[in-house]
Amino acid sequence: MLDVAIFAALGWEVRAVTQALSGLEAGDRPGTWHGYLGDGASCAVVRTGMGPARAAAAAAAAPPARLYVSSGCAGGVVEWLRAGDLVSATSVIRLHRDGQPAERLAVADARLTVWAAGRGFRVHAGPVASTPTVLATGGTKADAAATGALAVDMESGAIGAAARARGASFLVLRVVLDEAGQELPIDPSLIDEAGEVRVARALATSAVHPGRWPALVRLGRQRRRAERSLRACLAVVLGGGLDALGLPPSAAWVATG
């Protein structure tokens, strides 16, 4: 059994993880990699693609691990969170399509937030909502905030459910991409199956609707800021190994480590 499996939806989110690992190798299936934390603990990385259905399928196909980690970007739903801010979930609130809470998933009581703070990273701790649809308007984000969540993503609910089914611990580390009052200029039809923007189609759409350019430029800047923040934090956290993630060494790891 692996020590850690980390799930991320998008290419830049995956890169933020893999760049923090040593001994990185491609996995047996497309979109998977294997490597090691700073203390030598084993780690699988899985690119899920965007959305709960893809995340559930990817988590079901992933190898068993003691800890599942959902990592990547999120939308801020409280006014004081800014692009690039980091959030560690204290619980995950799964939402129905109508925005109503379906269930609350427990998250491991890890020391990640305190551990990161001791190394210069402020990670906000609080509930994260997980939704089956993109929350592209300030109104839908405000509805998510009413559940008590700090931020919202689309994959953590499915990954947490898979962790629960397998008896694995579960953590969420997300970086804010879009902010609470910010409306997203991206039409869902512009997102491909891997969760990446179809650049040519986006450019064509923006040519027809030039008023979207300022919002697209702003989102691009925020994406670069979010990637830098997540990459820097993961480099320190994953470099710290199991201790940073609040996971005790396995018996096998102790014997060989």
Image (cartoon, grey):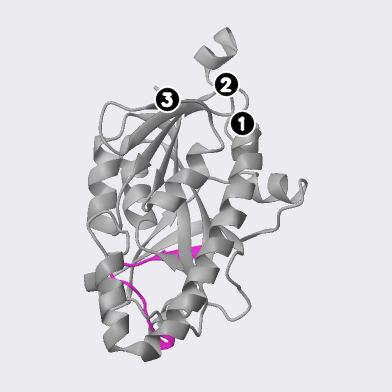
- Locate residue 50: give its quadrant: bottom left
**Whether residue 187 is visible:** no
Q: Which residue is mark 3?
A: 2
Say which element carries label 1. Answer: loop
Question: Which quarter of the rendered picture does the N terminus lie within?
Answer: top left
* Quadrant, the C terminus: top right
Q: Is residue 108 above or below residue 38?
A: below
Q: Secondary structure at mark 3?
A: strand
Callout 1 touching callout 2 (CB < 8 Å): yes
Task: Find the magenta span and give its range.
Answer: 127-139
Viewer-proximal residue among 57 and 224:
224
Q: Looking at the image, tell me whether mark 3 or mark 1 is earlier in sequence order.
A: 3
Q: Is residue 12 left or right of residue 49?
A: right
The image shows residue 44, relative to residue 120, as above or below, that is above
Residue shown at 46% from the left, 80% from the top: 146
Is 132 contained in the magenta span?
yes
The kind of residue tagged 3 is Leu
